[in-house]
Amino acid sequence: MILIDSSVLIQFFRSRSKVQTLFYKLARKYKSLSISAITYYEVGIGNRKSHLEYWETLTDCFTILPFNKECSLIAINIYFDLLKKNKLIDLADIFIGANGNFQQITNGNLEYQTFRKNT
């Protein structure tokens, strides 16, 4: 299983050549795809009404991972680790990375290295 980040989904939505996208490649490589409840929210608010049906159909193929207290504790550790290194990133990305760490699955994203071992 892999945790798909919103950056990967946005690239897929915007791309004319879907087969060249990271999402397409990850979907072919992994049998099981997941997104965080944070990603579901991020993409959901960014969608146009014309894409809502497509988004709902696509999310039926994902396991949507909840964000809970354990994820919050991991996110706090990631935040302070990145702060110490002067490499803070968007909080939503920290939450998504923490969710992947909690679930012990790889994070598939375009912008950042895997968050594993940051905690």
Image (cartoon, helix red, strand yellow):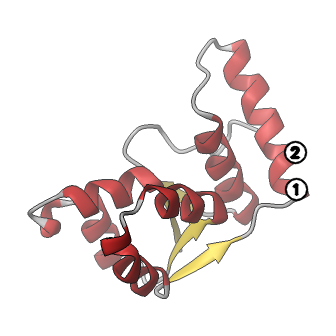
Q: Is residue 45 above or below residue 86?
A: below
The spot of residue 87 in percent (x, y) is 58, 18
Residue at numbered disc 1: 70
The residue at 71%/49% (across/down) is 98
The reply, left or right, for residue 39 in relation to residue 51 is right
Relative horizontal placement of residue 104, taking residue 45 as reference (left or right): right
Dot 1: element: helix
Asked if residue 119 lies left or right of residue 92, the reply is right
Q: In 3D space, how far apart are the residues under numbered discs 2 and 1 (Cα atoms)?
A: 5 Å
- In what element is the residue under mark 2? helix
Q: Residue at x 26, y 62 (%)?
A: 12
Q: Quadrant of residue 6?
A: bottom left
State the residue in front, 5 or 116: 5
Residue 46: x, y in percent?
44, 55
The amino acid pointed to by label 2 is Leu
x and y percentages locating residue 34 in the rendered image? 54, 73
Within the image, what quadrant is residue 54 found in?
bottom left
Q: Return the residue nearer the eye: 42 or 31.
A: 42
**Camera-nearest residue between 75 and 118:** 75
Above or below: residue 55 compared with residue 69: below
Q: Nearer the viewer, residue 7 or 106?
A: 7
**Could you tell me the amino acid type at mark 1?**
Glu
| Callout 2–callout 1 Cβ contact below 8 Å | yes
Q: Position of residue 23 (x, y in %)?
A: 31, 65
Using residue 43 as the reference point, say whether residue 9 is left or right of it: left
Q: Which mark is residue 112?
A: none
| Residue highlighted by disc 2 | 73
